[in-house]
Image (cartoon, rainbow, N blue to C red):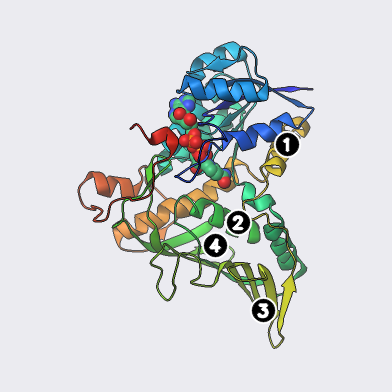
Amino acid sequence: MTYRVAVVGVGPGREVDISGKSHAFAYEHADAYADREDCELVACADIEREYAERFAEEFGIEGGVYEDHGTMLDEADPDLVSVCTPIPTHAPIVTDCAEADVEAVHCEKPMADTWGAARRMAEVCEDAGVRLTFGHQRRFGDPFRQTKELLDEGVVGDLERIEISWGNFFDNGTHSLDLAAMFNDEHPAEWVMGQVDYSKEHVRYGVPTADHAFVSWQYENGVHGIAATGDDVPLSGGSYDFYDCWHRLVGTEGVIELGRREEPALRYRRDGEGWTEVEVDDEFDGRVDLAIDDVVRALSEDGETELRAEHALNTTEILFAGHESSRRRGRVELPLEIDDHPLVSLIEAGEIEPTEPDDRPPHPSEADE
Ligand SMILES: NC(=O)c1ccc[n+]([C@@H]2O[C@H](COP(=O)([O-])OP(=O)(O)OC[C@H]3O[C@@H](n4cnc5c(N)ncnc54)[C@H](O)[C@@H]3O)[C@@H](O)[C@H]2O)c1
């Protein structure tokens, strides 16, 4: 069986300077499909025709160039669609794919711009029997896989707490909390409490994104999570080193430190013993090829993939609940019963106004806006 694959939102191209906010991630998806014998890239769509033409030329897509994904779905009849557009467009495009009867949609992270949209896109796909997955490819990176193996081997006993200190809470947080979910065997959370700060404007992939956040939560199996993100994290000189590592995993008999600023990137220490260093491949960005491999394998075997919507919803619920806790000024019990993005609602109501402008260079595709 050869799957007909289409990509929506291809980006300006890999040759474009990517020092700005984003980097045409569709090329990573397409590289993975192009390497497979069971997939054929048959169509692509981007509202910027020039981008779609550039992408089609590189991947040998003949006649399948579109500006409108709806026309693409009607005419190209793909089995599998990768959605790599800005966040607010994920849910509507995924919904259109489900209504067009595709077999599977692999959508980029974070799921959606509101909690309601995230839930609805998952429901629509579930009802239509469409496999929906998300681009949390970091979990396939060697450092994260080796960490999971250490936990499974019980080198630090039973996991009790996951501490995260990396990037921002929403866009980077979707990765770091997805990894936390993997470390904790995909248990959903029971409650979330947190505070987020939006004094510095930061619109990332179309959604206002709080950099400085402090959020804690408890999973159903009793494990605790804490995330401290942002450049102004207390006790640190940067977004990265509150715990001097991305993830610090505290067990009943020791601790694992992963993604350390200094070498080694991964190490663990059993209580009463010194540190043991673990050599890892430099795959902190994850492996898109293995993620797509998992998606296509699940499709062909009628099996499950780790990247399924059910797992992504668990993580996304914590992300939105952290913002909701900030709005309510209190702990939020799950399931989360809101529809919006609390930070966006507060900004729109004039209750939060950033005092510092976003001073990062625009992404090439946003330069004219
Ligand atoms: N998994 C990861 O590690 C990772 C890394 C980078 C980006 N991403 C995600 O990928 C997505 C895109 O990011 P990017 O860096 O590729 O952005 P990008 O700006 O380079 O590309 C997005 C493209 O989508 C197009 N587009 C916008 N609306 C559209 C629509 N309605 N129909 C068709 N095309 C449309 C834009 O013209 C643009 O070319 C985001 O959700 C981002 O979070 C994920």
Front in this rendered view, residue 133 or 120: 133
Closest to the observer: 120 or 205? 205
User: Residue type at mark 4?
Assistant: Tyr
Q: Mark 4: which secondary structure? A: strand
Question: Disc 2 designates what residue?
Answer: 179
Q: Please, is residue 16 above or below residue 266 in the view?
A: above
Report if the CB atoms under discs 3 and 1 are less than 8 Å apart: no
Quarter containing the C terminus: top left
Q: Earlier in the sequence, mark 2 or mark 3?
A: 2
Nearest the viewer among 70 and 245 is 245
Residue holding disc 1: 298
Residue 233 image-quadrant placement: bottom left
Q: Which quadrant, please, contains the N terminus?
A: top right
Which disc number belongs to residue 254?
A: 3
Front position among marks 4 and 3: 3
Instruction: Identify the mark nearer the N-term, 2 or 4.
Output: 2
Q: Separation of disc 4 and disc 1 at Cα?
A: 27 Å
Q: Are marks 4 and 1 in contact (CB under 8 Å)?
A: no
Q: Which residue is mark 4?
A: 219
Question: Comparing marks 2 and 4, which lies closer to the viewer?
Answer: 2
Mark 4 or mark 1: whose residue is earlier in sequence: 4
Label 3, ligand 1: CB separation under 8 Å: no
